Amino acid sequence: MGVKHDIEVRPIEPDQLDALLALCVEHAAYEKAEFTDDGQMERWRAAFFAERPALHGWVALDDGRPCGFMTVTTDFATWSARRFAYMDCLYLQEPYRGLGLGRVFLERLREFAAAEGCGWAEWQTPPDNESGIGFYRRMGAATKDKVRFSYDVGAGGLS
């Protein structure tokens, strides 16, 4: 089944940050994670819309209503001394899964990575996200076994 003709994937715009917040709350619940609204909309505004953005994002719109999103950053790999794209989030509301939108988002990821001079893209998903894992494998992505750590350094990040 192909993507419905009235759904489009476009770069996130400033007036869509409220919708992004709601989608992030849903995404966290889907991943059985905690989400706290602590003012990220202003930090997003600075990250997305700066002269040199720290965060890049796209939103899926069904007749103008946001129904999914993807966010990406760029990073640098020491071993290869090359830039790569890191997909931080990809989320679609349940009724929009299986319509081909994930493929559209991954194509945007590929286009973005190439335009930014990145050699590859990486991302992660929870080990119990079987449908996501299956989708990524069908799209030709390979897994790398590593354990992800988080180290709280007490900095507030962007203010």
Image (cartoon, rainbow, N blue to C red):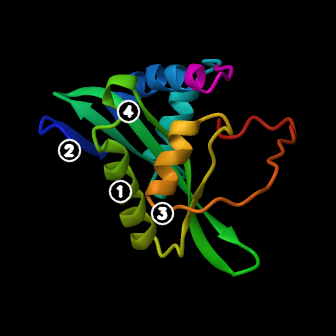
Q: Which residue is mark 2?
A: 2
Identify which amino acid the numbered label 4 is placed on: Gly
Q: Nearer the viewer, mark 4 or mark 2?
A: 2
Figure quadrant of the N terminus: top left
Q: Which residue is mark 3?
A: 140
Q: Earlier in the sequence, mark 1 or mark 2?
A: 2
In the rendered image, the residue lying farthest to the bottom is 80
Q: Nearer the viewer, mark 1 or mark 2?
A: 2
Circle 4 crowding by C-alpha within 10 Å: few under 14, some 14–19, many from 20: many
Q: Nearer the viewer, mark 1 or mark 3?
A: 3
Q: Earlier in the sequence, mark 3 or mark 4?
A: 4
Q: CA distance from mark 1 to mark 4?
A: 14 Å
Which secondary structure dominates the residues rendered in magenta? loop
Identify which amino acid the numbered label 2 is placed on: Gly
Q: Residue at x 39, y 71 (%)?
A: 115
Q: CA distance from mark 1 to mark 2?
A: 17 Å
Q: Which residue is mark 1?
A: 108
Q: Is residue 89 visible?
A: no
Q: Earlier in the sequence, mark 1 or mark 4?
A: 4
Percent position of residue 87, x then y: 54, 51
Q: Earlier in the sequence, mark 4 or mark 2?
A: 2
Q: CA distance from mark 4 to mark 2?
A: 16 Å
Give the extent of the magenta segment: 28-35
Badge 1 element:
helix
Q: Residue at x 51, y 46 (%)?
A: 134
Q: Nearer the viewer, residue 125 or 13?
A: 125
